[in-house]
Image (tube, helix red, strand yellow):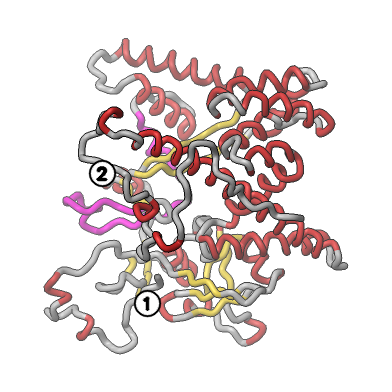
Amino acid sequence: MTIEQPPDEPIAGSAPDLPPSEATSDGGAMSALPAEAPAVSSEVAATDEMPGGFAFALSSLREIQRARAGLDAMETALYAAVFEHVDALSKQTAEPIAERDMMIRSACAEIAAALRLSDRAVQRRMSDAYDVYVGFPQTFEALRTGAITVRHVQEIVKASDGLPVDMRADYEVAALERALITTPPRLAAVLPSVANQIHARSIAERHQTARKRRAVTVRDVGDGMAELVALLPAVLAHGIHDRLTSIAVAVEKADPDDERCRDEIRADVFADIALSGAPLAHGDGLRAIRANVQVSVPVTTLAGGAGTGAELIGVGPMDADTARTLAGNEPGWDRVMTHPISGAVLAVDRYRPGEDLRRRLRVRDEHCRFPGCRQPAHRCEADHGLAAADGGKTHLDNLALLCKGHHTMKHAAHWQVVHEQHGVLRWTSPNGNTYIDTPTPVLRFYPSEGAASGDGNSAGDRPPGDEPPPHIP
C-alpha cells in the first residue's frame, strides 16, 4: 500500500508560510502568526478595525481545516496499511485461524498501549480505516485533498451500512456530490434517502437484517450517572417511550406536588420496571439491585456522617445515599486496610472468610490490568505473571486480573509481564516495546501538610519496604 502524504499546496488567498529563520524555538501556536497580525483585546474587535486581520484569520482557518483533513487521511492510510501488513503475515503462517487473528489483535493492543487508548478503540479505528481506504477510494481522496472533513466521511460510511458492494460506487458518487456542498449534520439527514433509492433490497428485507443488531449498551457520563442505550426496532422503541410517557402523565395527575419533571419521572419509571418489574413510580428501583458491583465506602459515610461519598470501582464517585442503600442490602462487607500515604492495599478481611486472595485482587486492580482496558474486575480472570508450572506462586505479588481477551492474547501472542512493587506491571510487547500499568490507588485523597512536614506520617517515618508506588509519567 502506498501511503499518501497530506497536501501541501496552499489554497487561494491563504497566508504564505514563514521561513524557518522566522520560527521561534518555543514551538507554540502564536509563533506561526506573522509579525503584522493585530493583537486581539479581551473584547471582539470589529471587522473594520482589523484591516486584513479577518481575511487572514478566515484563510488560516480554512488552511487548518484542510491540513487536519490531510492528517486524518494519513492516519486512515496508516491504520489500513498496518491491517494489510499484519493480515498478509498471518496468511503466510500455517497456524489456525484463531491464532492468525491473534496477530492482528496483538498489533492493535500495542498501538493502543503506545497511544494510551483502549485496544478496542484501536480495533474500531483500524476496521473503519480499512473500510474507507479500500471500499470508498473517492471519499478517501476527497479527505486527502481537504475537500471534505472526517465527519463527512463518517456520515458517508454510516449511511452505506447494508448497501451491496456492487452498488457502493454509485452511492459514493451521489453522496460526495452532496458532501462537497453541505455540512455533516445536513449530509446525515439526506444520505439515508440516497442509499434507499440506490438499494436493490426492499426496506422490509433490510429491516430484518438490521434487527439482528439489537443491543443494550451502557456509557458512563460522569457525576455518578450513565447512559443506558437500547438499539431496538423503531416501533418498539417509540412504543416504550410512549408507555413511559403515559405513566409519567398519570403520576403527575395523581400527585400534583411531585417536584420531578416529566423526563425525571420517565427515567425513574424505566428504572423501576427494569429492576423490579413494576412501575413503582417513585424511583425506588435501587432496592431491587442485586448486581455484582464493588463499592468503596468510607466507614463514616456508612454511619451516616458527612463522609466524602463513595466510589463505584472502575467507574467513579457515587453519592453517599446510594452507597448506604446498596450496603444495607448486602449480607456482608469487605474491610480494606490501605497505606495512609499511597493508598496501596495492605490487607482485606471479612467476617466470613472466603476467596481472600481473589478479593484482594479485585480491590487492588479494579479492572483488567492490560494498559488502557477497563473491563471490571468481576469479569476478569486471575493470571500468574510467572506461570505456576514454572514455579510461580499463587500470591498477590504474582497475580493480576486480566479480561478473557487480554488473558488469551498474553499467552497466544507472547506478551511478557513483570510484576514490580505495589502491583505495578511492566508489559513487553512481542516487538520489544515496554508499557507500564499502575493500579488505581484506593485512597483518593492526599495527606495534610502536617503529615508531609514530619508529624508522624511523613515519608521519612515510613518503615522500610512500605514506600508508595513509583510515579509513572
Q: Is mark 1 on a helix, strand or loop?
A: loop
What x and y, as percent, mark residue 196?
A: 72, 19
As drawn, 372 above or below 423: above
Question: Which stretch did the figure color magenta?
Answer: 283-311
At x 56% / y 68%, what residue is drawn?
382
At x 49% / y 20%, what residue is drawn?
241
What x and y, as percent, mark residue 42?
A: 20, 39
At x 32% / y 50%, what residue is drawn?
35
Q: Nearer the viewer, mark 2 or mark 1?
A: 2
Residue type at the position of mark 2: Ala
Horizontally, residue 190 falls left or right of residue 170, namely left
How far apart, in angstroms, are the residues tagged by discs 2 and 1?
45 Å
Location of the C terminus (image quadrant):
bottom left
Location of the N terminus (image quadrant):
bottom right
What x and y, as percent, mark residue 260?
A: 29, 23
Please tell me whether residue 377 belongs to the stretch shown in magenta. no
What x and y, as percent, mark residue 175?
A: 68, 26
